[in-house]
Image (tube, rainbow, N blue to C red):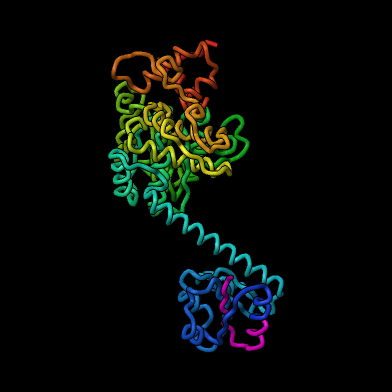
Amino acid sequence: MNQILIIEDEPVIREALAQLLQRRGYQVADAGSVEDAQSRYEFEAFDLIIADVRLPGAPGTDVIARAGHTPVLIMTSYASVRSAVESMKLGAVDYVAKPFDHDDLVLTVERILRQHRLERQNQALKTDLAQAYPVSGMIGSCSGMQEVFARIDKIAATNTTVLVLGESGTGKELVARALHERSARCNDPFVAVNCAAIPDSLIESELFGHEKGAFTGADSTRTGLIESADGGTLFLDEIGDLPQPSQAHLLRVLQDGEVRRIGSERARHVDLRLIAATNRDLKAMVQESEFRSDLYFRLRVMEIDLPPLRERGPDLVELARFLLAKACKQLNKPPLELPADTLQLVTSYPWPGNVRELENAMQRAAILAGEDRMVHRDLLAIDPSPGGATEPPPMGDAVSLEEYFRAFVLEHQDQCTETELARRLGISRKALWERRRRLGIPRTK
């Protein structure tokens, strides 16, 4: 039951307000002044404090600084904009003007308590998550992930540019969000952009914005995504796919802190932190003149290299159970179990699609699981047999992910649809198309 403290020097108003709230099921305490209330009560023990602005001794607004996390609703006999603004500036959650309508007051109290309860629940969830998974929900006890967590802890509070490296599906955006949430910019925008998902003809307009009439079809002024991230963090995923003209414009943003919309003669100042990510070898691209060297060196001030899932042995079982529980919760299904033979398959399979593929497999299993609440091997839809579709063709002991992808697609594209190919690789159709384009693998049908 919510507890409310009323601080009001007029006994008639104080008693009437107390009775009104008690009839609504609230527990109510009262006092005639700020000093009286502080001598008798602990302010943070209440869910809401309602205080008149004019009291004998200290004004009611003095309660705001002493109330800690307890919200304060200010009452005033002077329904002026000035008194409202002053109360809100001091931190009051809201204000009501006397004489107030009883129904309106009750609705205001209910809204404040509901919002305060949600904030406390959210904080509790964040605390629990931080204790269980110290870096924004990412799981990992292997040495590679521990190095990632340590690097995040060291550089999150800085404004330095960060380059996140790793194969597709390893969680590069999670790292970017962790850096943002642990920085001083955490209350400002986090804008994520997949450079590979935007056609080259549109990426300039999307990133930098444009003025009305700048080109055919520019019927109105558009704010670019870089400007939208002002004050916060800009995350550019798949930055290796950024066209070279856009690379030059991005370099100016990093060097001068300015962005110029297409068709504008005036540059706008932006204050943002840039985090970039790629699964490509930018150093090799620089050597082949596919990526600007000056931008590359601007990006790699700090690097974070995410290990692929196949190298995170100790984490596989923990991740599988976590993702299965997450899927069950999202689908509103009872908890499921992973028997020993299924776990053996999980730990032996190479997971070319990394964590994203594992998450998809667990979600599929949660949907298809039977009444025995067991995730059997066949529910994962992966084939570890030598002739299975997911087994890489023989190419020697050492094989890169791109070589594996090329060989797999060339071997199976005549027998599979694009949807089937993407599912077996543990990626989306869009990601399959992007890799085909990047590696120059045409479709045969």
For this view, does 47 lie left or right of residue 339? right
Look at the image and say whether residue 5 sits in the magenta stretch: yes
Above or below, 80 against 333 in this view is below
In this view of the protein, which residue sits in the foreground, 229 or 250? Answer: 229
In this view of the protein, which residue sits in the foreground, 339 or 310? Answer: 339
Would residue 239 be seen by someone viewing this image from the given angle? no
Q: Quadrant of the C terminus?
A: top right
Residue 353 percent location from the top left of the image: 43, 28
**Splitting the image into 4 quarters, where does residue 24 fall?**
bottom right
Q: Which residue range is magenta in the image?
A: 1-16
Residue 265 percent location from the top left of the image: 49, 40
Q: Residue at x 48, y 49 (%)?
A: 189
Would residue 120 be seen by someone viewing this image from the given angle? yes
In this view of the protein, which residue sits in the foreground, 16 or 300? Answer: 16
In this view of the protein, which residue sits in the foreground, 431 or 364? Answer: 364
Q: Quadrant of the N terminus?
A: bottom right
Above or below, 306 against 53 in this view is above
Above or below, 228 against 291 in this view is below
For this view, does 374 lie left or right of residue 254? right
Q: Residue at x 57, y 75 (%)?
A: 4
